[in-house]
Image (tube, rainbow, N blue to C red):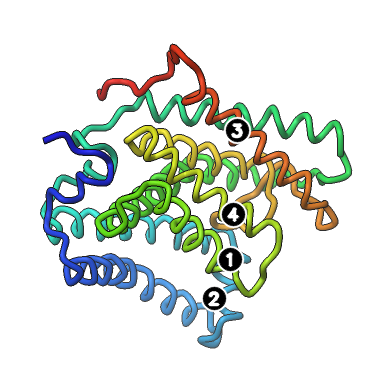
Amino acid sequence: MNFTFLTVARQGRNGWKRYLTAIALIIGTFSIVCLPLILMTTLIAGLPLENSSYDAIFYDNFYGSFALIVLGTGSFLLGLFLAVTKIHQRNFLTLVSPNNSISWQRIIQGFSIFLALRIVAWILLYFLLPDRYILSFQASTLFNFLLSFLVLPITATATALWLAYLLQGLGLVIRNSLALSILWGLLLGGIPYISNWNALVLLNIFHYIFIAWIIFKDNRLELVMGLMIADRYFTLLLKSGENAFNSPSIFQLADSASTLPSILYFLFVYGIFYYIFFGRKNNTLSPASPH
């Protein structure tokens, strides 16, 4: 039987009780590692157990947030691996492709082209609207910058695998790719920000719809994995808000920056990316054979 990215999830055991158990396992594995770290660090620092203390240690402080992200990502991946292989009883690589394989070439293609598009588009925007950006890099943060450079691909990969797991789970119920992509965008890109609705939320919804559609179009996860790694790396060039473990960046988006250029920027990048991979006849960037 030929499986697709969505139907491959039917290889395993997929009752709703198993999904509840699997999600509980993932959250539990993450909590077992991270909660003791948070409590012990807060108590050792002599701070009260309240949100402001956690922010001071794990967000405002680079190394605290770095430790939490690294340990959290590792425990999260362990929980996800156990959930897929033990509870759902299927190959872990079914999260990546329907033939249980991974194409490193496809990851590199997605990474290199998306990062190049973002940098080129940003350079054009910088020359058109230089006041949007503030030079924020400091030589004293170089070590933090290098640590971020090493870890960001791991966090991006973990996020991509988690999204794949949820997408395949929803695909057991909603089998129309377009409907699932739209629902996916609303669930991940819209609902979490409903209390602070603005034009950028619409862009966020479109972002998740785009990611889901790319996965369905390519019938694999690797292209999106490369895209997400490139997206994380771009935060080292330009920080436009909160990013992973408060990592340093070379430029920062000014608070007064208009929203419209950002929307046009992303629509341009997404449009060209899609055209390069799926909009041309005799496309040489067809899915690569797995390695």
Q: Nearer the viewer, mark 2 or mark 3?
A: 3
| Residue pointed to by mark 4 | 204
Direction from residue 61 to residue 252 in the image, left or right: right
| Residue pointed to by mark 2 | 54
**Quadrant of res 67:** bottom left
Residue type for callout 1: Tyr
Q: Nearer the viewer, mark 4 or mark 2?
A: 4
The earlier-in-sequence mark between 2 and 3 is 2
Separation of marks 4 and 3 at Cα, in angstroms: 15 Å
- Relative height, residue 113 to residue 88 (above, below): above
| Residue pointed to by mark 1 | 59
Residue type for callout 2: Tyr
**CB-based contact (under 8 Å), mark 2 and mark 3:** no
Q: Residue at x 44, y 56 (%)?
A: 184
Separation of marks 1 and 4 at Cα, in angstroms: 23 Å
- Relative height, residue 12 to residue 273 (above, below): below
| Picture coordinates of residue 123, whole percent (x, y) | 75, 30
Separation of marks 2 and 3 at Cα, in angstroms: 40 Å
| Residue pointed to by mark 3 | 271
Separation of marks 4 and 2 at Cα, in angstroms: 27 Å
Q: Residue at x 33, y 72 (%)?
A: 31
